[in-house]
Amino acid sequence: MELLYQYAWIIPVLPLVAAMIVGLGLISFNQVTNGLRQLNAVLIVFFLGTAMVLSIGLLVSQLQGHESYRYMLEWASAGNFKLEMGFVIDHLSALMLVIVTSVAFLVMIYTDGYMAHDAGYVRFYAYLSLFASSMLGLVISPNLVQVYIFWELVGMCSYLLIGFWYDRKAAADACQKAFVTNRVGDFGLLLGILGLYWATNSFDFPVIGERLEQLVSSGAMSGAIASFLAILVFLGPVAKSAQFPLHVWLPDAMEGPTPISALIHAATMVAAGVFLIARLYPVFEPLPVVMDVIAWTGCTTAVLGATIALTQNDIKKGLAYSTISQLGYMVMAMGIGAYSAGLFHLMTHAFFKAMLFLCSGSVIHGMEAVVGHDPILAQDMRIMGGLRKYMPVTATCFLIGTLAICGIPPFAGFWSKDEILGLAFQANPALWAIGWLTAGLTAFYMFRMYFLTFEGGFRGNDQSLKNKVMEFYGLLTPAFGPGAMDVKELDHDTHHSHSPHESPIAMTLPLMVLAVPSVLIGLIGKPWANQFEAFIHAPGEVVEAVTEFDWSEFYVMAGSSIGIGLIGISIAILMYLQHKIDPAAIAEKFPTLYRLSLNKWYFDDIYDAIFVRGSRRLARQIMEVDYRVIDGAVNLTGLVTLVSGEGLKYLENGRAQFYALIVFAAVLGFVVVFSVV
């Protein structure tokens, strides 16, 4: 077993090697490599599967009580400065390794069916493998410098994958938006890392926390400066985990293929932010101001994402705002000191949200057989309906994921979300109240999505409804783009079917596998026998065995959580299943609130006005200054030089008599002047 720890660095290297082999093949022998589609996919899936097996072995070893393993080597040194690199295997990294590899493994299997007809099939697999490698490298990083390196690699891979269909303007804009927004948070993270090193002379997580606490307690550093540095570092997770106010990139990331949407939203990019908060918990925990900032940022994000999701019609964007809301719960948990609860929700959410996104891809794949390869029509829930009859496996899995995220027992989301709400009530009742109401909104919009997509009659053949949807988006003709269906199917509308179909086994098998942990994995975190907390407790925390569990408190908190969820589900049933309440009438009665939700609280419009158009106006003004002042000064200098040169060429003619005449005239001038004076 010790050998497994010594060679744990192989886990991120395996998918990296696979990506390099395929990437070099694409660069050197493009046609041959693209022709060997299945072989390349098998190679990448095999390497990642091997990494998954090794990760499971490490997790089992940690569960059996093996001590944490840390390997370091000197990477660079200059005088007293030494920078070490290496890897660390502890409870947190072992858990994250299994989450990332297992979800990525299933996503890659799913990709074979979803991207089967895409010309970039091999390139997409190479990007996926590189993305997985970057995240795996991040979770075993022992210090902030190494985290930052892999942090940026994760961002680069997300840019490549979100903009995978770069010939579609929406995808090109989305990847740029994600990249720029994350640069804002990453700049704060970089400043925070440098500031923490200045204060503690270390990049190692435990050392930073210990020394910073000593500096503050001894008075050598003010708590305000320490809090400022910690908040700068927190800006990195704010951007990566799509927290308010840097959440705007995540919904637009849906322009990428659905497999990467599942991977980004479940186990890789957005999880990196919560993971870094957990790693830096010894830094944040002793600073109450920072913990409050983290908690309220998460709480605000949770309710923000939920209120926007209420009116979304695109199935993937609805799930995207759901992800933002659930990430808010995780960050709020970290802020109130519920370390294990936040990570528990991260784990359960990774499985059921990956399944929900893959289900949405299955729905899109089925809808494309009817509406053609138009991303707007294929993803709009208003022209779906009744898909449970045509896609029973996808519908069942989506329902399981919906029940899990709504917090209905015994599904996984109930145990993790209820634990966060229970601890929030103890820490701050206001946070609990907002989180509790958000849970009701979650139940409503998730069942709204389920009913619109899978129940009722199929609306995909209603041409007038399709036209209304296109008019809603300001389009008159379908916006065809690249994707999962064979482009030959786009040639003639007569080739389209009149009903959707279930996805192939390569796509439905990962759904069924993910459905198992979505139902059962929450049971390891039962509050009366919380095995997860005993395993993943916060650094330095001693977990005491619960001798007597308070069932009355559990019944009250769990009952209130289930109750608000059932209320949300009931309203969704009345609106979208039984049609006893008209959503349009409510929208007309509260037009301001409806438009606020539909327009995403106007964040995109505000940012566009301030940062995009504002930057352009500033650039134009600077250009005017450059043109009129700087260029004018340069041009004036040239003109003076030209004029003076033209004049001097008549004086500098090389004739001694002319020079003598000038000297005589100058002397005569001086005589006249001094005579007058």
Image (cartoon, rainbow, N blue to C red):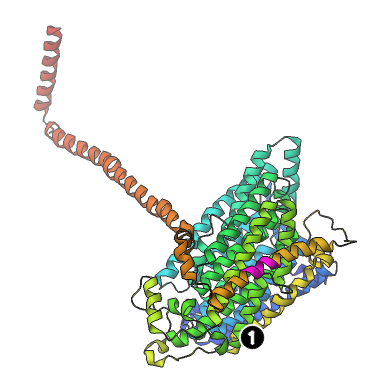
Q: Which residue is mark 1?
A: 509
Q: Residues within 10 Å of mark 1 (few under 14, many from 20)?
A: some
In the rendered structure, the answer to whether residue 106 lies left or right of residue 483 reads right
Q: Give x and y (percent) for residue 504.
A: 57, 89
Q: Is residue 588 above or below residue 447?
A: above
SS at mark 1 in the image: helix
Q: Nearer the viewer, residue 346 or 597?
A: 597
Q: Nearer the viewer, residue 191 or 184?
A: 184
Image point (87%, 58%), residue name: 544
Q: Give x and y (percent) for residue 238.
A: 59, 56
Q: What is the quadrant of residue 522 in the picture?
A: bottom right
Residue range in magenta is 562-567
Asked if residue 131 can be seen in this view, the reply is: no
Image point (44%, 65%), residue name: 588
Q: What is the quadrant of residue 539 in the picture?
A: bottom right
Q: Give x and y (percent) for residue 661.
A: 9, 23
In the rendered structure, the answer to whether residue 412 lies left or right of residue 328 reads right
Q: Give x and y (percent) for residue 305.
A: 56, 62
Q: Nearer the viewer, residue 224 or 324?
A: 324
Q: Nearer the viewer, residue 151 or 35?
A: 151
**Amino acid type assigned to the residue bearing label 1 in the image:** Leu
Q: Is residue 85 above or below residue 397?
A: above
